[in-house]
Image: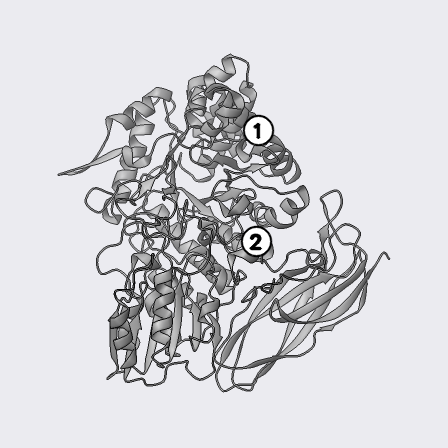
Amino acid sequence: MGAPLYREAGAPVADRVRDLLARMTLTEKVGQVNQRMYGWDAYERTSDGHRLTDAFRAEVAAFDGMGALYGLQRADPWSGVTFADGITAADAARVADSVQRHVMSSTRLGIPVLMVEEVPHGHQALDGTVLPVNLAVGATWDPELYEAAAAGTACELRARGGHVALVSALDLVRDPRWGRAEECFGEDPYLAARFTEALVRGMQGGDAVFAPDRAAVVLKHFAGQGATIGGRNSAATELGPRELHEIHLVAARAGVRAGAAGVMAAYNEYDGLPCAADRELLTGLLRERWGFTGLVMADGCALDRLVRLAGDPVAAGAMALDAGTDLSLWDGCFPRLAEAVERGLVSEHALDAAVARVLTLKFRLGLFERPYVDEDPDRAAPQAGLSERLARESVVLLSHDGTTLPLAHPSRIAVIGPNADSLPQQLGDYTAPQRPGTGLTVLDGLRAVAPPGTEVTYTRGCELVGDDRSGIADAVALAAGADVAVLVLGGSSAREADTRFDSNGAAVVASGAPAGMTCGEGVDLAGLGLPGGQLALLDAVSATGTPVVAVLVQGRPHAVPELSGRARAVLSAWYPGPWGGRAIADVLFGRAEPVGRLPVSVPRSAAQLPVFYNAKDHGYRGYVDQPATALYAFGHGLSYTTVEYGEPRLSRSKAPVGDPALTCTVTVTNTGARAVRETVQLYVRRLAGSSSWPRVRELRGFARIELAPGEEAEVVFVVEADTLVSLGRALEYVVEPGELLLETGPSSDRTSGALLTLTRS
């Protein structure tokens, strides 16, 4: 008798799935949709290496298999994993293989387990390459560069035995008070969609069967989580269907079209239902309308939150499964799905559909043929170069007096501030511990890049949070004797060993006591200003008369009107990752041009929120006590030269809605003395419409060009139906007749437009 069909490598995946599914018991099926174990509980370190725990063996035995194992290699203060007891790069493949070997050899059907890992900005594991956070990535406006970094991360992940990457991509920064703003590519759906596509292409490649150096992507979070009320984590939303589709589903739709293997259902409610229980969202929209065939994973412990709706864990699991959730995460509901089926709360057919999607991904990853790691040292090489390049291209020059930067030949530089010499504070949330000697702080970077003979001095000046001013006198003395003061301010998402955590790993921070964290999951702010100590430091240092260059290391756009008039130049470096210190120094000294552009609007204060650039304009005036506009607009970013834009020119000024193809051309000239990489932006603004709100400016294209001093270039945007679509009354994308402006410029608040009339024929 030959091998069963599901073991035949050449057979179609669908046939293999059907054959395997037909052989499975109800218990085995339930095991395949469960991911309830924390991976760091599956092993323990011994004097001889690592051994699998009894808890892991019992979990496998309970369901005669294991669907997925989350975070085998995760390391951070929540998991408690450090270099003392965790899995390093040298150990990773061996430990992952031992897990896989046990699952396959000790179960009846020998189904391999999915190894699921957090990959928020690089693999969250010991020795994993850390990238800048997503908000920094969005500031590069360079999806191609991010695609290369994502491909490198996938190589690292697979070389260590990981298969599935959980990556934030779908949330938008609609309220910068939200602590998870750093995990977003920005506030704009078009920009987020382009980076989401790049992520999927880079991580997964383009084939139906994953290559050995490519990983499956689960996109987080579906859907609308960035619109939670008050910027509070996991809160409900007040979205209507139009805003959900126009803003919060655009990146998800792009990711699905690019072939993403999965999406993660968000914590938030939409129209009264948590996303993991929303059948219309997960089945009606995602599967039936969009044709998505991948898997839907629940967020951590999210299904347990459904008990208050369903009445008990069994009914809660049935509710989520029936809605379209395929794979659980740490909850106590999905383990009881067999009981739900036996009680008639959900059909076994629904369970089979979820199991089939999990099995399909395992076959696509080639796990039945190649369950163990194909160790290749070259393939696992760290991607530090790409991380540093992303950091360098993410730096945004917000303001500049035109003379202070780039730094010429200062004899003495005073480096001051709580973010100047702290590697953890420039890494962001969801980051593993770093080996000593890894990376460069801003202070390190300036010392490494400064010309010979330059003296670089340092003092902290103040604490990151609070109002302590005890170090300001030393900072004033240091600044007074320097040619320039580089003041490094901002926030931090660095978790500490004594940080308290919720059951899902979110930080628990007492109100009014930030404990060193001002950003990250669970760390939401009511105000967006810098803490009192930092503002006092700014005042004192600027009062010395020494030119001040302010560098903001941050995971959200802080409101910083106080910097105007006090700092000669202001840069946002976001959380730039381990090598961000050198990247920042390169920009300050002019070894690299500032090419970053804002992926978010920077508010004047939290009181004026929301300030996202594509808000619907009702024609009302701003506030009496302050403008309603952003301090720095979406798309803004200066360079060390001057650039002029001509008026946009259309290849035709009228076009039928059935064939709206045309071109929009703009002439861009470098009128300064330094080379520049300019990000030319295309916006569409409808002047009248029947279903879409008129006069809203929407990003619909961008192009990066490099210009030598005095050089002129024509940038040509191909304008097609996808560029001009709007959401119709039936929530379908259509090209409507009417008048539009096609606008080009360097930012959303500095555009010139050309009129286009779309006709019915």
Label 2 SS? helix
Three-letter amino acid code at the position of disc 1? Ala
Q: How crowded is mark 2: few (under 14 residues within 10 Å), some or many (20 or more)?
A: many
Residue 632 lies, with reference to residue 105, above or below; the image says below
Q: How far apart are marks 1 and 2 (CA)?
A: 25 Å
Residue 228 appears in the figure: no
Q: How crowded is mark 1: few (under 14 residues within 10 Å), some or many (20 or more)?
A: many
Left or right position of 610 against 590: right
Residue 32 lies, with reference to residue 528, above or below; the image says above
Display colour scheme: one colour
Left or right position of 458 against 568: left
Label 1 SS? helix
Q: Where does the image place residue 15, in percent across and percent down from the top left?
A: 53, 29
Q: Where does the image place residue 502, in percent across and percent down from the top left?
A: 37, 37
> Can you identify the residue that label 1 sits on?
323
Q: Which of 146/313 is in front?
A: 313
The quadrant of the rendering that contains the N terminus is top left
Left or right position of 697 against 173: right
Q: Where does the image place residue 190, in percent across and percent down from the top left?
A: 60, 56
Q: Where does the image place residue 352, in percent across and percent down from the top left?
A: 52, 24
Q: Residue at x 27, y 35 (%)?
A: 98
> Can you identify the residue that label 2 sits on?
193
The quadrant of the rendering that contains the C terminus is bottom right
Mark 1 or mark 2: whose residue is earlier in sequence:
2
Left or right position of 168 against 77: right
Three-letter amino acid code at the position of disc 2? Ala
In this view, the residue farthest toward the left is 47
Q: Which of 51/462 is in front?
A: 462
Q: Which of 269/72 is in front?
A: 269
